[in-house]
Image (spheres, rainbow, N blue to C red):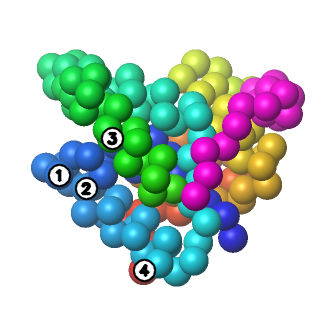
């Protein structure tokens, strides 16, 4: 079964002092070692870059451009596939936001679900499972991966 890795899991892997760092690293390692195909969305790379290059005072990682680029390269090497943003993603997203009455910040979560639908991925590895409630995907919490 394939799993999409949410941005928050990617970010926690690069924050050794964060409470979720160990769980993020352990969960992805266990899933990869178990033969689980782990995917990332292009949207998640953009979100990662935005947070990684934002200052810590603004809830970011404070990485310079070279360090952020190195982190993105490491992410791209680690995960099986960077999922494309194709026309079907938009169609799934538009249907989801209208049918599920999605508003505000949740439109970005719905877009990740649309990527999953377009690529036939059923599970999402995330620390923010509640953000995806009612969007029709199975949430896998990193702390629960054994």
Magenta stretch holds residue 87: yes
Whether pointer 3 and pointer 4 mark residues with C-beta atoms closer than 8 Å, the reply is no
| Between discs 4 and 2, the one toward the N terminus | 2
Please report the residue visible at 38 percent of the width from the left and 48 percent of the height from the top.
74
Write down the residue under mark 2. 21
- The answer to which quarter of the image holds residue 41 is top right
| Between discs 1 and 3, the one toward the N terminus | 1
Please report the residue visible at 26 percent of the width from the left and 46 percent of the height from the top.
14
Gap between marks 1 and 3 measured at Cα: 13 Å
Label 4 Cα crowd, 10 Å radius (few <14 / some 14-19 / many 20+): few
- The answer to which quarter of the image holds residue 139 is bottom right
Judge from the rendering whether residue 36 lies leftward or rightward of residue 122; answer left or right.
Answer: left
Label 1 Cα crowd, 10 Å radius (few <14 / some 14-19 / many 20+): few
Out of 23 and 81, give the one closest to the viewer: 81
Write down the residue under mark 3. 71
Magenta stretch holds residue 138: no
- The answer to which quarter of the image holds residue 84 is top right
Judge from the rendering whether residue 130 lies leftward or rightward of residue 94; answer left or right.
Answer: left
Q: Secondary structure at mark 1?
A: loop
Label 3 Cα crowd, 10 Å radius (few <14 / some 14-19 / many 20+): many
Please report the residue visible at 49 percent of the width from the left and 27 percent of the height from the top.
46
| Between discs 1 and 4, the one toward the N terminus | 1
Gap between marks 1 and 4 measured at Cα: 20 Å
Whether pointer 4 and pointer 2 mark residues with C-beta atoms closer than 8 Å, the reply is no
Residue 7 badge? none
| Between discs 2 and 3, the one toward the N terminus | 2
Write down the residue under mark 1. 16
* Number of the front mark, 1 or 3: 3
Write down the residue under mark 4. 146
Out of 95 and 43, give the one closest to the viewer: 43
Query: Residue 86: image x %, image y %?
Result: 79, 31
* Stretch of the chain drawn in magenta: 80-98
């Amino acid at each position: 079964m394939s799993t999409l890795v949410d941005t928050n899991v990617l970010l926690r892997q690069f924050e050794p002092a964060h409470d979720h760092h160990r769980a993020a690293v352990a969960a992805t390692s266990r899933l990869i070692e178990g033969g689980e195909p782990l995917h990332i969305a292009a949207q998640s790379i953009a979100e990662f870059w935005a947070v990684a290059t934002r200052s810590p005072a603004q809830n970011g990682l404070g990485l310079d451009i070279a360090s952020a680029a190195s982190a993105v390269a490491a992410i791209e090497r680690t995960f099986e596939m960077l999922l494309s943003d194709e026309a079907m993603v938009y169609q799934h997203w538009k249907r989801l936001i209208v049918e599920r009455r999605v508003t505000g910040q949740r439109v970005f979560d719905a877009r990740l679900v649309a990527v999953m639908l377009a690529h036939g991925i059923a599970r999402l590895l995330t620390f923010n499972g509640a953000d995806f409630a009612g969007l029709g995907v199975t949430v896998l919490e990193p702390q629960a991966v054994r």
